[in-house]
Image (cartoon, grey):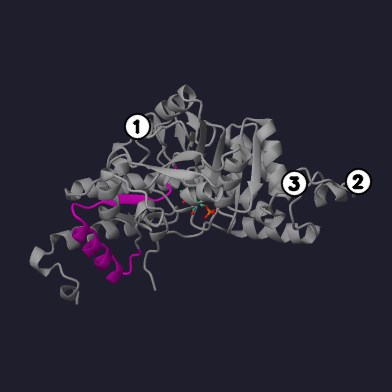
């Protein structure tokens, strides 16, 4: 149906072979491949430990839990994120305090707004590397240190992204990654927590599997069958079939991110050549940031223009999305009765449009997408009604 989808899988024979080999090995749950994937991912991110979990939401929730975030605590999160970032805080019994983005060009957590929102109850800062654009980690790290707060990175969009040469996911107490199907590398569902703190990693491993002192894989390796439960935990385990996919995907990550970068440069160039009134967040990235180019957001001049362009792209078979409807617009948040004032998030959310981006998207598809946006914006204003489209 779509001529250009928002994202596509980058799987080939390698993923297939690794999965078949895992099934042949007759060990499909958490075992040797999960351990190998954890080690490889931690090495890639430059952290001492990697703890694989069932998804990115579990990574966030478990990290907050393991760091002792609970009732009465506040956690600073951007409103411009996927709902999971705030939900993880809520499920710990704590309160997400919503922070604005810096600007429409830099849709990551605003340092000034974050500092203003720190109270005696604040326990952690949880920035998101939106679209794979590293948040301003120098200022945010400093803010966390000065106020003795945990810094946790929501790095779901940012495997391979770097800030001042250092990998996203290696700055704070922990980095939380997602391997959902649309992510830069995917295992279908899956997540990873990276940390330099071995005690935190031990606690995360314990909580991930019911607080049990011995795992099935340990028992298979000959460890005693008896176990204790040190703390009531969860089943947030990863499995070896997904680890097989993860290992194959991780090998390609740098190449895939490089291909994404090239397509983003082409998008940026074509948009500026067209001279359109659109903001391109990826066109104003400072040299200190090396993004992972997870999605390609543009910001139109008005909400009406955004909706009109999205509709025109859809008619041409080009899939788009909105990243994101902000947390504070959801009924679940409104029901908390908290009021917020987030002017940049408001403007960004009402005017943002996400265009297709994945490594195998062709250059001519990029050109065609920009041309379609250009045509839509050239339509006379009085014809910009949905009924005028047909
Ligand atoms: C910014 C952000 N945080 C957290 C998550 C949650 O990850 P998952 O879908 O793997 O639970 C996602 C993924 O969709 C995300 O985009």
Considering only order in the chain, which callout, 1 or 3, is on the residue closer to the N terminus?
1
In the rendered structure, which segment of residues is drawn in magenta? 292-319
- Return the x and y of residue 18 as percentages of the image width and height: 69, 56
Residue 184 in sight here = no
In the rendered structure, find residue 211 and report the number of the disc placed on it.
Answer: 3
- Return the x and y of residue 188 as percentages of the image width and height: 58, 59
Q: Quadrant of the N terminus?
A: bottom left
Task: Classify 10 Å Cα crowding around label 2: few (below 14), some (14-19), many (20 and above).
Answer: few
- Kindly report which numbered mark, 3 or 1, lies closer to the viewer in this rendering: 1
Residue 192 in sight here = yes
Q: In the image as oriented, which residue stretches furthest toward the top?
A: 146
The residue to which callout 2 is attached is 224
User: Foreground residue, 73 or 41?
Assistant: 73
Residue 29 versus residue 147 in the image, above or below: below
Question: Which residue shows up at 40% across the image and 54% down it?
Answer: 333
Considering only order in the chain, which callout, 2 or 3, is on the residue closer to the N terminus?
3
- Return the x and y of residue 160 as percentages of the image width and height: 50, 39
Residue 373 versus residue 201 in the image, above or below: below
Task: Classify 10 Å Cα crowding around label 3: few (below 14), some (14-19), many (20 and above).
Answer: many
Snapshot quadrant of residue 386: bottom left
Question: Which residue shows up at 72% across the image and 50% down it?
Answer: 209
Q: Quadrant of the C terminus?
A: bottom left
- Kindly report which numbered mark, 3 or 2, lies closer to the viewer in this rendering: 3
């Amino acid at each position: 149906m779509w001529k250009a989808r928002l994202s596509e899988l980058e799987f080939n024979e390698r993923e297939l072979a690794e999965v078949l080999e895992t099934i042949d090995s007759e060990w499909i749950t958490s075992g040797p491949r999960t351990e190998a994937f954890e080690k490889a991912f931690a090495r890639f991110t430059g952290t001492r430990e990697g703890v694989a979990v069932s998804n990115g939401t579990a990574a966030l929730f478990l990290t907050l839990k393991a760091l002792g975030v609970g009732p009465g605590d506040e956690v600073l999160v951007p409103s411009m994120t996927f709902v999971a970032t705030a939900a993880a805080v809520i499920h710990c019994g704590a309160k997400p305090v919503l922070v604005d983005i810096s600007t429409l060009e830099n849709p990551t957590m605003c340092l000034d707004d974050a500092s203003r929102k720190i109270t005696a109850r604040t326990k952690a800062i949880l920035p998101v590397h939106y679209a794979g654009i590293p948040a301003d980690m120098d200022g945010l790290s400093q803010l966390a240190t000065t106020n003795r707060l945990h810094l946790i990175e929501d790095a779901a969009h940012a495997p391979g992204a770097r800030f001042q040469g250092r990998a996203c996911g290696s700055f704070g107490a922990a980095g939380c990654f997602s391997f959902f199907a649309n992510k830069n590398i995917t295992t279908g569902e899956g997540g990873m927590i990276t940390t330099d703190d071995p005690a935190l990693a031990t606690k995360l491993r314990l909580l991930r599997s019911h607080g049990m002192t011995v795992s099935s894989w340990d028992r298979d390796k000959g460890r005693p069958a008896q176990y204790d439960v040190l703390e009531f935990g969860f089943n947030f385990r990863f499995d070896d079939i997904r680890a097989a996919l993860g290992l194959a995907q991780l090998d390609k990550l740098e190449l895939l991110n490089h291909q994404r970068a090239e397509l983003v440069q082409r998008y940026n160039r074509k948009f500026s050549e067209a001279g359109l009134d659109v903001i391109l967040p990826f066109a104003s990235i400072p040299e200190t940031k090396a993004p992972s180019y997870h999605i390609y957001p543009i910001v139109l001049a008005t909400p009406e223009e955004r909706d009109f362009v999205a509709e025109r792209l859809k008619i041409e078979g080009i899939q788009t999305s909105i990243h994101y409807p902000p947390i504070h617009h959801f009924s679940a948040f409104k029901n908390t009765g908290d009021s917020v004032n987030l002017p940049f998030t408001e403007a960004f959310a009402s005017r943002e449009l996400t265009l297709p981006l994945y490594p195998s998207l062709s250059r001519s598809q990029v050109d065609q997408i920009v041309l379609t946006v250009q045509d839509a914006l050239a339509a006379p204003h009085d014809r910009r009604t949905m009924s005028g489209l047909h």
